[in-house]
Image (tube, coloured by chain):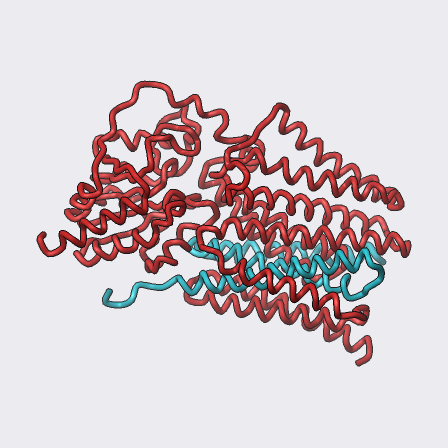
Chain colours: A cyan, B red
C-alpha cells in the first residue's frame, strides 16, 4: 500500500505548490526581504521531523543528529519570526500632514 | 489518552498549521496586514510542534528540550543583526534548514537500515532529501561567507569548472540510485553526503557578489524542497505543504531576479559573470564633471521633483539615515522626493526597501522600476547613491555590452543627474558607465555617507536664505 500513500503526498505537494505560487505572486515587492525571512521560519517546520528523531531515542547516533536538527530548526524559527516582525514594524506610511 | 485519539488530534493540529501558514503568506502581501501574517505563522508553528509532541513514539523529551533551548538562544541574536547584514543572516538560515533536512534524512536511513524497513520509495526520498539538504547547507554557508566578505566576493573560477561541478552532482545522484537499488550498501551513504557537500561549495564559489539576490532565492527554494522531501520520507503532509510554500516562494523570487537582470538560471549558476567582461573597458574616456557636495545641494534646492536611486553602495556606507535627513530637508522645501528601487539593487530581494524603511522613509515613497521609469523625463534631479549597473544606459542600446537587455532605471532621461561614487572604478561587471560622462551628469566623489552628510549640512545651513 506504500505506493498509494506516495500518490496522496504527491497530490498534496502539487496543490500546495500552486497555492504557493498564487499567494507569493501577490506579495508586494516592497516586502520581499520579510517574505524570505518568513518563509524561512515556516520551512523550519523541519523541526517536526527533528523532534520525532530526537524524542524516539532509538540509538545514540540518531538522537545526536536529531538534537542538532532540532537546534538548527529552532534557530530558524526564533530568528525568522523575530526578524520578520522587526522589519515589518519599520514599514510605515507617510503620516498625514508631513 | 489512547493512541488513536492522540493521532487524530495530531492530524487536526497539522491541518490547522497548514491553513495558518497559507494565511500567514496571504497576509504578508500588504504592509498593513503583514504583521498579522507573522502572528499566523507563529501560531501555525506552535500548533505543528504541539501536535508533534503528542506523537506516541516520542518517549523522551530531554534532548528535544536541549535542542529547543540551544536553538532559541542562537536565534535571538541572529534576529537582531544590522539590516545591512540581513542577506548573510538569510543565507545562514538556509544553511540551517538544509542541515536539519540532511541530518534527519541520515538518521532515518540509519534507523531503517537497522530495522530492515528501507523500501525503494523510502530510500529514494531520503536520497533526494539528503542531497538537497547538504548541498543547500554548504552552498548557503559559502553564500553567507561571500556576503560577509569572509570569502572573496569575486567569482572564483578554474578550468573545466562546470564539467567538474556537474560530475560531482552526477556522482551524488549515482550513489543515490545505487542505494535505492541496494539499500544495504551503506558505505554509499557517506559518499553521497560527501559529494553533496562538495557540490554545494563548488556551485557557489564561481558566483559573484552582484548575483547574490538570485543565488539566495534559489537556495531558499532548495531549502524548501529539502523540507518537502523530508515530508515524503516521514509521510508528513504539513512538512510537504510548508516546504512547498517555501520552495515556490524561492522559485518565484529567483525568476523575478533573473528577469531583472535579463539572464537565465543557467547563466547565473554556470556563467561566472564578471569574469569575462573585464575587457569591455577600453576606448577613449570622456571626461567626467566632478563637483562638490555644495554643488549637489545647490542643484537639489532648485529642483521641484527629485528621485533618489539607492544601490548596494548606500548599504555598504550605511548612508540610509543621512539619505533620510536629506529627504526631510528637501521635503520641507516642498520638493517632491521619491525613491526608485531596482529589483536587484542590494544583495537580496527587497533589500533596499528594508534599509530605507529602517531609516523611517515612508514606504509610499519607494517606487518600483516599472512604475517610476515613465516619470524620469519629468524629473529635475536624480541622485544616484551607490548604484551602478542598474542605471547604465548601455543596457538599452549597446549590443556589445554584457548587460545589454537588462531592464534599467532610465535616469539618463532626467534633466540632471548627480552620481555619488567612491571612485571611477567600474562597477561589479567591469563595464564603463556612460551615464557618468553624460552632459547632464555631475559626479561627487567620496563615501556616500560623508557626501550626503555634507549635502544635508549645506541644505540646512542654506535654508531660509533661498
* On-image quarter of the C terminus of chain A: bottom left
Instruction: Return the x and y of residue B232 as percentages of the image width and height.
Output: 74, 55
Q: Is residue B264 visible?
A: no
| Relative depth, front residue between B438 and A86 | A86
Count of marks, rendered view: 0
Q: Can residue B191 be seen in this view?
A: yes
- Residue placed farthest to the bottom in the image? B1
Give the residue at x 78% y 78%. Answer: B5
Left or right: B197 as drawn, with respect to B266: right
Give the residue at x 40% y 45%. Answer: B316
Depicted B252 relative to depicted B433: above or below: below
Instruction: Return the x and y of residue B410 as percentages of the image width and height.
Output: 31, 39
| Relative depth, front residue between B10 and B308 | B308
| Relative depth, front residue between A64 and A81 | A64
* On-image quarter of the N terminus of chain A: bottom right
| Relative depth, front residue between B379 and B86 | B86
Instruction: Return the x and y of residue B262 as percentages of the image width and height.
Output: 46, 36
Left or right: A82 as drawn, with respect to B242: left
Give the residue at x 42% y 65%. Answer: A89
- Residue placed farthest to the left in the image? B465
Amino acid at each position: 500500500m506504500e505506493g498509494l500513500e506516495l500518490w496522496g503526498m504527491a497530490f498534496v505537494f502539487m496543490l500546495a505548490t500552486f497555492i504557493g505560487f498564487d499567494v507569493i505572486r501577490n506579495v508586494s515587492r516592497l516586502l520581499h526581504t520579510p517574505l524570505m525571512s518568513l518563509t524561512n521560519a515556516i520551512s523550519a517546520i523541519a523541526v517536526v521531523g527533528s523532534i520525532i528523531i530526537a524524542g524516539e531515542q532509538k540509538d545514540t547516533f540518531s538522537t545526536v543528529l536529531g538534537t542538532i536538527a532540532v537546534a538548527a530548526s529552532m534557530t530558524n524559527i526564533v530568528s525568522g519570526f523575530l526578524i520578520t516582525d522587526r522589519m515589518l514594524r519599520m514599514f510605515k506610511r507617510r503620516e498625514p500632514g508631513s | 489518552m489512547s493512541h488513536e485519539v492522540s493521532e487524530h488530534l495530531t492530524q487536526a493540529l497539522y491541518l490547522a498549521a497548514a491553513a495558518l501558514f497559507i494565511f500567514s503568506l496571504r497576509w504578508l502581501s500588504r504592509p498593513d496586514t503583514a504583521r498579522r501574517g507573522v502572528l499566523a505563522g507563529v501560531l501555525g508553528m506552535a500548533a505543528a510542534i504541539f501536535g508533534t509532541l503528542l506523537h506516541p513514539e516520542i518517549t523522551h523529551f530531554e534532548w528535544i528540550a536541549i535542542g529547543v533551548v540551544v536553538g532559541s538562544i542562537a536565534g535571538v541574536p541572529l534576529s537582531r543583526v544590522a539590516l545591512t547584514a540581513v542577506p548573510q543572516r538569510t543565507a545562514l538560515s538556509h544553511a540551517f534548514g538544509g542541515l536539519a533536512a540532511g541530518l534527519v534524512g541520515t538518521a532515518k536511513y540509519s534507523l531503517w537500515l537497522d530495522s530492515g524497513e528501507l523500501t525503494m520509495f523510502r530510500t529514494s526520498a531520503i536520497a533526494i532529501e539528503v542531497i538537497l539538504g547538504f548541498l543547500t547547507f554548504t552552498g548557503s554557508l559559502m553564500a553567507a561567507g561571500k556576503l560577509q566578505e569572509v570569502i572573496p566576493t569575486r567569482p572564483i573560477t578554474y578550468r573545466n569548472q562546470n564539467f567538474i561541478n556537474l560530475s560531482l552532482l552526477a556522482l551524488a545522484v549515482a550513489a543515490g540510485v545505487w542505494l535505492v537499488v541496494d539499500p544495504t550498501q551503506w558505505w554509499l551513504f557517506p559518499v553521497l553526503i560527501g559529494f553533496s557537500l562538495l557540490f554545494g561549495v563548488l556551485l557557489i564559489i564561481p558566483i559573484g557578489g552582484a548575483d547574490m539576490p538570485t543565488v539566495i532565492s534559489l537556495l531558499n527554494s532548495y531549502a524548501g524542497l529539502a523540507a518537502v522531501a523530508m515530508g515524503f520520507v516521514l509521510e508528513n503532509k504539513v512538512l510537504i505543504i510548508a516546504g512547498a510554500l517555501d520552495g515556490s516562494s524561492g522559485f518565484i523570487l529567483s525568476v523575478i531576479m533573473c528577469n531583472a537582470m535579463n539572464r537565465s538560471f543557467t547563466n547565473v549558476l554556470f556563467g561566472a559573470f564578471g569574469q569575462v567582461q573585464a575587457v569591455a573597458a577600453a576606448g577613449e574616456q570622456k571626461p567626467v564633471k566632478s563637483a562638490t557636495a555644495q554643488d549637489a545641494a545647490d542643484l537639489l534646492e532648485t529642483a521641484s521633483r527629485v528621485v533618489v536611486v539607492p544601490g548596494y553602495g548606500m548599504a555598504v556606507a550605511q548612508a540610509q539615515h543621512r539619505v533620510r535627513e536629506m529627504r526631510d530637508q528637501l521635503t520641507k522645501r516642498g520638493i517632491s522626493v521619491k525613491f526608485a528601487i531596482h529589483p536587484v539593487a542590494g544583495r537580496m530581494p527587497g533589500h533596499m526597501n528594508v534599509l530605507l524603511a529602517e531609516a523611517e522613509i515612508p514606504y509610499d515613497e519607494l517606487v518600483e522600476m516599472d512604475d517610476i521609469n515613465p516619470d524620469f523625463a519629468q524629473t529635475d534631479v536624480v541622485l544616484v547613491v551607490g548604484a551602478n549597473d542598474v542605471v547604465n544606459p548601455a543596457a538599452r542600446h549597446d549590443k556589445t555590452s554584457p548587460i545589454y537587455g537588462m531592464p534599467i532605471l532610465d535616469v539618463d532621461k532626467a534633466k540632471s543627474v548627480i552620481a555619488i561614487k567612491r571612485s571611477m572604478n567600474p562597477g561589479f561587471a567591469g563595464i564603463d558607465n556612460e551615464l557618468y560622462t553624460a552632459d547632464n551628469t555631475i559626479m561627487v566623489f567620496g563615501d556616500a555617507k560623508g557626501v550626503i552628510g555634507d549635502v544635508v549640512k549645506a541644505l540646512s545651513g542654506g535654508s531660509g536664505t533661498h
